[in-house]
Amino acid sequence: MSTPTRAKAVKTQAVHVAAVAAAAFLVMPGLVMAQAPPTPPRVAQTPRPKSPPQPAAPRPAPVQPPAAPAPTAQNPASPVPTTQGAGTQGAAKASRDDVIGRVGNSDVTADDIRAYIATLGGREQAALAQDPALLSQAVRLLLANRLVLQELVAKKWDQQPDVEAQLQRVRESALVELYLQSVSAPPASFPSEEDVQKTYDANRSAFLMPRQFQLAQIFIAAKETDKAAEDQAKKRLDDVQRKLKAPGADFAAIARSDGEAKDGGELGWVAENQIRPEIRAQIMGLAKSAVSDPVRLDDGWHILKLVDTKASYTRTLPEVRDQLVPQMRAERAAMLRRAYLGELLKQHPPVLNELALSNLLDNSRK
């Protein structure tokens, strides 16, 4: 393998690591009371009898670099943004306006970022839309990895035999995954409207939304292990309760001035099954706009206001279509993959030397 080829393979692997690590930034911090609706379980589809797909030449992914990236647990061959050379000049450079970030002589362009976003799931893309700072973090991580890449290439670290062997194994695994994706991809026409409707009807219970409560809270922090802090918090709590009982009391204003919550203590809509039992027991019997008694949790005192309530309902097909169709396609692809592999192994049965394998295991234990 020539030096430029080895460098390109290492670059691709490093950028893949950057993309995988950057995706970790897209996991939003969990709240005590999560507000996202639950993801429905695996849908049950009525399988269509089909002959296994025949092997076909793999279709090149539109953003896939020449050397495939390292597989991951969730997506062994997820495409990542292409890179410019760690020390080489491209035949056509991006214009200055297209360069999003630069470290050393390596750029991250607008096309790189668009390609990266295209590899993300719907939830991650929604998170980016809500918080652009997450994308900035991802770009910074990509640039940091480019800097490491430049250093390792300069040191010819990628030319070590054990590194080359690892890269070859990664490349082979990624090629296999890409090929399996190409031969197990459902046709573009799947699922049909009839397929979607039948799957929705068969899994209607999975789309049941529990009752939801729109809540606001006044929170007073207090540690049970700190007697002085507990006494101080109790005094604040008594003062807050006195203000709440006054005629025309403004819950949001009291939350801002006396509590430790922003935005007037607004929590938004929270599903019933995502509320802590101690809180749920208090708000279940409240009337609209009523305020609960103080609830003592391990972090302090909570006073809840029930702003509004939504009854439990089943989400309609138009509401879940964008979630249901990709799931159906993913399950059909998995079924086609199993069928293809089963037929391939049937045509070419593998032969194992069980004795040699047993000896290998025995030797590894010594």
Image (cartoon, rainbow, N blue to C red):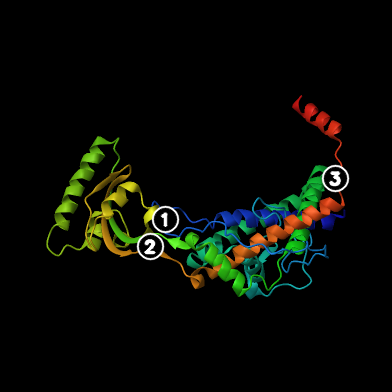
Describe the element under mark 3 as helix, strand or loop: loop
Q: Is residue 354 left or right of residue 234?
A: right
Q: Closer to the camera, 217 or 38?
A: 38
Mark 1, secondary structure of its residue: loop
Q: Residues within 10 Å of mark 3 (few under 14, many from 20)?
A: few
For the question of whether residue 335 can be seen, the reply is yes
Kindly report the distance in space between the C-alpha atoms of the residues bearing marks 1 and 2. Answer: 17 Å
Nearer to us: label 1 or label 2: 2
Image-based side of 248 in relation to 221, left or right:
left
Q: Which residue is mark 1?
A: 34
Residue 195 in percent (x, y) is at 61, 69
Q: Is residue 338 above or below residue 99?
A: above
Looking at numbered disc 3 in the image, what kind of residue is underneath it?
Pro
Report x, y in % for residue 80. Answer: 68, 61
Q: Amino acid at mark 2?
A: Ser
Element class at badge 2? loop
| Image: 122 above or below 144 | below
Mark 2 and mark 3 residues within 8 Å of each other at the beta carbon: no
Residue lying at 51% horizontally and 68% vertically, measured from the top left = 320
Q: Which residue is denoted by mark 2 in the rendering?
A: 312
Q: Amino acid at mark 1?
A: Ala
The CA span between labels 2 and 3 is 53 Å
Number of the label disc, if any, that sits on residue 1: none
x, y percent for residue 169: 79, 48
Instruction: Give the labeled residue for mark 3.
Output: 350
| Residue 276 locus on image (x, y percent) | 35, 49
Q: How many marks?
A: 3
Residue 292 falls in image quadrant = bottom left
Residue sitting at the far left: 247
- Quadrant (top left, top right, bottom left, bottom right) of the C terminus: top right
Which is more toward the observer, 222 or 74? 74
How many neighbours does mark 2 have within 10 angstroms: few (below 14), some (14-19), or many (20 or more)? few
